[in-house]
Amino acid sequence: MSELSSPAFGTALTLTLLAGLSTGIGSALAFLVKHTNKRFLTFSLGFSAGIMLYVSFVEIIPEAQESMHAILPESSAAWIATAAFFGGIALIWLIDQLVPEVENPHEMSLIGEMETGMPEEQKLYRMGLFTAMAIAIHNFPEGLAVFFSALSDQNLGIVIATTIALHNIPEGMAVAVPVYFATRNRMKAFSFSFLSGLAEPAGGLIGFLLLKPFLTPLVLSVILAGVAGIMVYISLDELLPTAEEYGEHHLAISGLIVGMGVMAVSLLLLA
């Protein structure tokens, strides 16, 4: 049990918890503002995608391959890292297929106004409940991404936790708004959103406990490459399409490029 009390474990769990609970920030923001600032949201989603794509291809995959090189021949390490990368994509794609499209947070509608009428309360309440469940399911592999990245490299974990947190904020809004419309109960709407985020630290912790007996440097490197695949899928399937749908194309791309630039400078400063 020494791993559970190690500083690296505590840091990884804390970062995963903070990333997951950012859904609560989204629900709180939904009640503080009358309209969603779609331009800001578009730029932020593009910015998050830029960070996640850049760090996946420039930092995580090379780091995973380099770790494997110390154990395996170079050609074998490259093949295994590539397979793990696409394995991460396959995992999150499979989860997407298992979640009905209506309740899938990757297909979610965000917020219009908070002060419209309250039609079909039962339907709205059900939509909020299932959206919360769907987000909880998606947060499991995201929790793995944050936790194992932080376990491997604290600075990398901070970057990934921050970007995951940014993209969890609109998901929190997507849960809170229909529940609030249906019940007019802010606390209930906030609770649904907040609790859905707890699946993220749960995913990281459960994944760690299940894999701990097998957590050799090679296995950790494979997981890291899989994390890169998960992050690339989230960026291309969720962040960029949502940014495009709710804002201007060029604004989303500007956010993407700025995110890449910020990540590039950060990595150079940390080198």
Image (tube, rainbow, N blue to C red):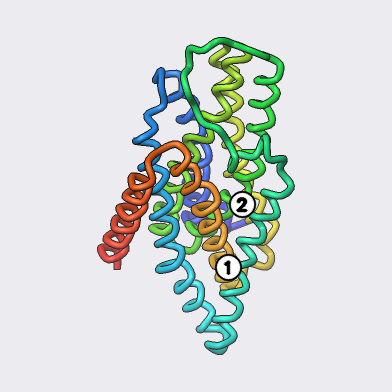
Identity of the residue drawn at 36% across and 51% down: 253
Q: Quadrant of the N terminus?
A: bottom right
Q: Which element type, helix, strand or loop, lies under badge 2?
A: helix
Q: Position of residue 136 (x, y in %)?
A: 64, 39
Where, by quadrant of the figure, is residue 103 drawn?
top right
In the rendered image, which residue does mark 2 sit on?
141
Alpha carbon separation for disc pair 1 and 2: 14 Å
20 or 255, nearer to the observer: 255
- Marks 1 and 2 close (CB-CB < 8 Å): no
Residue 85 shows which numbered tag? Answer: 1
The disc, 1 or 2, on the residue closer to the chain's N-terminal end is 1
* Residue 161 versus residue 100 in the image, above or below: below
Circle 2: residue type: Pro
Identity of the residue drawn at 55% across and 32% down: 109
In the rendered view, does 143 fall on the left or right side of 248?
right
244 or 239, nearer to the observer: 244
172 or 251, nearer to the observer: 251
Examine the rendering and report whether any part of residue 5 can be seen: no
